[in-house]
Image: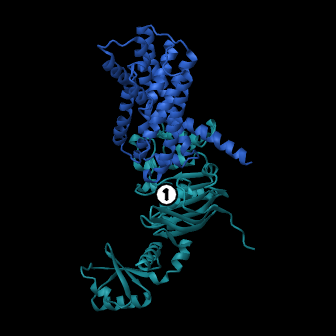
Chain colours: A blue, B cyan
Amino acid sequence: MFKEQRFSNFIFNLRGSLVVAEKDARIYYLKPPVIIFGILFPVFFFLAFSLGRQVQTHILVPALVSMTLFFTSSSVGPLVTPWERGARTYERLLSTPVSLFAILLGDVLAGLVFGIVISFAPLLIGIIFFHTSILHSAIFLVGMVLSSLCFSSLGVLLSSPATEAPSQVMMLSALIRFPLIFISGIFIPLENLPSWGKAVSSVSPLTYSADLIRYSLYGLEFYPVFLNIIALLAFSIAFFTFAVKLHRKNLIKAL
Amino acid sequence: MMEKKEVAVKVHGLTKYYGDFLAVDNVSFEVIKGEIFGFLGPNGAGKTTTIRIVTGILLPDKGKVEVSGIDTLKNPIAAKKIMGVVPEVCNVYVDLSARDNIMLMGKMYAVKRREREERAKELLQKFDLWERKEEKTRRFSRGMKQRLILAMCLIHQPEVLFLDEPTSGLDVKSSRMIRDILQELRSKGKTIFLTTHNIDEANILCDRVAIINKGRIVASDSPEQLKGAFQKTQSVEVSFNVTFADVNWMESIPEVNRCQRLGDKFKLYTQNPDALIKKLGEHAMKNNLHFTSLNTLGPSLEDVFLKLTEERETTDV
């Protein structure tokens, strides 16, 4: 009986996560400015780094795809909870028969799907302008999903401070996300980095994402594929676990 | 033989600290199935914290809560499925239409699609929102939003409703509509737990009330029983054909405990209405005053509330 109850709750929560993801998509993601910003920002950022420099295609395209994944998957997630708090819809959501874990999982799912869909745009740029082809489609898919999961979980972690002012979270988000790009060395092959650069880049999930996507498109990798997958999984679990703990801890202050 | 009443909500020894501050202090009460139970208290008394714990949003430091026999701490999901909740700080999704807001809540409670659509239609019509069902709620008035919030909390046909200040700050039409619907829900056997600081509302709606002050329950009974226990706070409401700038003469009557001006009337609190009316009559004769109105009043629920909350404050000092 107890097992049945637990299973029923699990299904109910899973369903709740999907409803939350759908709600997030409709209310926060599927807005023209969000979609346009999601595509344009990584492209401009990419151009700023690559124009006038001799960067090879096998570095450029994976960098652009992984950076788009990074920016899009983690762009809206940090703002969803502060927006909900500010709009006074957060407590209503908490009173439904869906756990906080499932609500946050729903937020992650929304970011994950948004990140994957938008990241097909830079992939198309690679295919059309740089004659890129997908060499290992299964690894490519795994790379896209795991990278997006990891970055989306980071986004939800960044939404945990007990504030209803999105500007505060934006600042925190910029403080964390931009340094991650710079230390990832996504525009410089990891093998060309000095040893301290390699060590620093290993703390960024973006490093493993770019390396995995590079392998799936060009068959080139620095870390073994399984290590990239394990690293992305570990970062995802760590980010989400911390996100749930911090959201729970800040619940009273946030109401 | 007395009929055994079924308990819908059972709260025992609820205690909650915010840091060192004791917000809810060993609160216990029971809500009988099919009644409207009012939870009254001044601002900061612990009403919202209690309702948040009872509805599974917050965890208590101590205590136990059962809703329809389900332990909300051990199985919050099952308990929440049979509850309908309107939190105090609550809003609709302003980027969604009225219908989509209701449908969203239906999905959260796993109501089947066809039922969801039928009930959404029924609720939108009942709450007088059908004409604007496809409109985004951004431009809705506060009253319309509150009606929609109540409709959202009814989509899954909950057994027990928890409403935190449901009519606070609303226009007369919306307040009355919500009260009428609450009475209708009670007649259909739903249990309603209502927090309010609107004493009149509690007096009209509630079968029983509990008064909470500084985190503790100071009284719990039916409104009439509570009033009966405070017969000392009877009053005489009087108005004359002239208005007075100086009311010292009324306050100086020995039978008057307190004098309160209410527009062109005066409410004189007394333990002896008979003697007070005689004194007022003598004064009116002597000064050639005419009574415009004269009423004796029993203690109101507001009097009881004030008395109880004041007494507690005095005790604390």
Is B27 on the left or on the right of A252, as rendered? Answer: right
Q: Within the image, what quadrant is residue B254 found in?
A: bottom left
Q: Which residue is drawn at 30% across and 15% down?
A: A51
Name the foreground residue: A10 vs A179. Answer: A179
Q: Residue furthest top?
A: A131
Q: In which quarter of the image is the C terminus of chain B?
A: bottom left
Q: How crowded is mark 1: few (under 14 residues within 10 Å), some or many (20 or more)?
A: many
Query: Which of the pair A27/A212 is nearer the observer?
Result: A212
Classify residue B266 by image quadrant.
Answer: bottom left
Note whether B90 is above or below A215 in the view shown. below
Give residue A147's position: percent from left, percent from top: 49, 27
Where's residue B57, x and y in %?
53, 53
> Mark 1, chain letter?
B
Please determine whether, in this image, residue B94 is positioned above or below residue B184: above
> Residue at 43% of width from left, 13% of height from top?
A58
Residue found at x 34% / y 22%: A45
Q: Which residue is label 1 attached to? A: B164
For badge 1, the amino acid type reads Asp
**Considering depth in this image, is A133 or B281 the residue closer to the camera?**
A133
The residue shown at (54%, 21%) is A224
Q: Point out the residue furthest to the front here.
A: A195
Residue B244 percent across, percent down from the top left: 26, 80
Is disc 1 placed on a helix, strand or loop?
A: strand
| Vertical position of residue A239 compared to residue B9: above or below | above
Q: Is residue B135 something that shows in the picture?
A: no
Q: Can residue A196 be seen in this view?
A: yes
Where is residue B13 drawn, in percent x and y? Answer: 58, 67
Residue A124 as seen in the image, left or right of residue A105: left
User: How many labels, in total?
Assistant: 1
